[in-house]
Image (cartoon, rainbow, N blue to C red):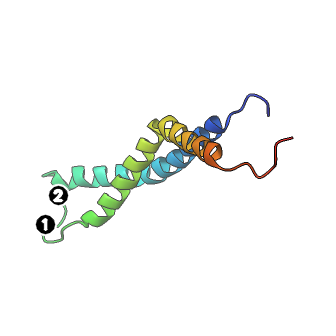
């Protein structure tokens, strides 16, 4: 695999994880937006004595936001991770004697 760097592999992994979380929670967030649109509507209003559970909305929204953020910041995180790995390798003692 000539030409593929460690930073590219990390970046691809972060984008894949971000896509998984964003796409997994997108349908739930869209469903909640649809629910609240109908809930606030005068024509199709739901039972007013039954309040919706905002915990499910918050969980889905935070997962979607975290996944989307990870997609757009994948390069930054992979650069920081590679920089940390490089500094660890530079500071590690060489176990083989120089010949």
From the viewer's perspective, is 9 left or right of 57?
right
Q: Is residue 68 above or below residue 36?
A: above
Q: Is residue 2 above or below residue 47?
A: above
Q: Which residue lies furthest to the right in this view?
A: 99
**Which mark identifies residue 36?**
none
Residue 41, how many percent across, how many down? 16, 51
Q: Residue at x 79, y 34 (%)?
A: 1
Q: How many dots with numbers?
A: 2
Residue 78, image quadrant: top right
Residue 3, how many percent across, how many down? 74, 28
Q: Is residue 90 above or below residue 57?
A: above
Secondary structure state at the residue bearing disc 2: loop
Nearest the eye: 60 or 30 = 60
Q: Is residue 50 above or below residue 81?
A: below
Q: Residue at x 82, y 42 (%)?
A: 98
Label 2–label 1 contact, CB within 8 A: yes
Nearest the eye: 99 or 45 = 99
Residue 38, how many percent across, how many down? 23, 52
Circle 2: is it few (<14), some (14-19), or many (20+) Cα within 10 Å?
A: few
Q: Which residue is drawn at 66% across and 38% down?
A: 6
Q: Which residue is labeled 2 in the image?
A: 45
Q: Which residue is drawn at 18% across and 71% down?
A: 50
Residue 48, how many percent across, how many down? 13, 66
Q: Which residue is labeled 1 in the image?
A: 48
Residue 51, image quadrant: bottom left
Secondary structure state at the residue bearing disc 1: loop
């Amino acid at each position: 695999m000539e030409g593929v760097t460690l930073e590219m592999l990390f970046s691809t992994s972060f984008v894949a994880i971000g896509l998984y979380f964003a796409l997994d929670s997108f349908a739930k967030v869209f469903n909640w937006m649809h629910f609240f649109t109908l809930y606030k509507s005068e024509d199709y209003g739901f039972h007013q004595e039954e309040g919706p559970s905002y915990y499910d909305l918050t969980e889905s929204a935070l997962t979607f936001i975290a996944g989307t953020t990870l997609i757009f910041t994948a390069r930054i995180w992979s650069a920081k991770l590679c920089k940390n790995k490089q500094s660890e390798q530079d500071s590690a003692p060489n176990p083989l004697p120089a010949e």
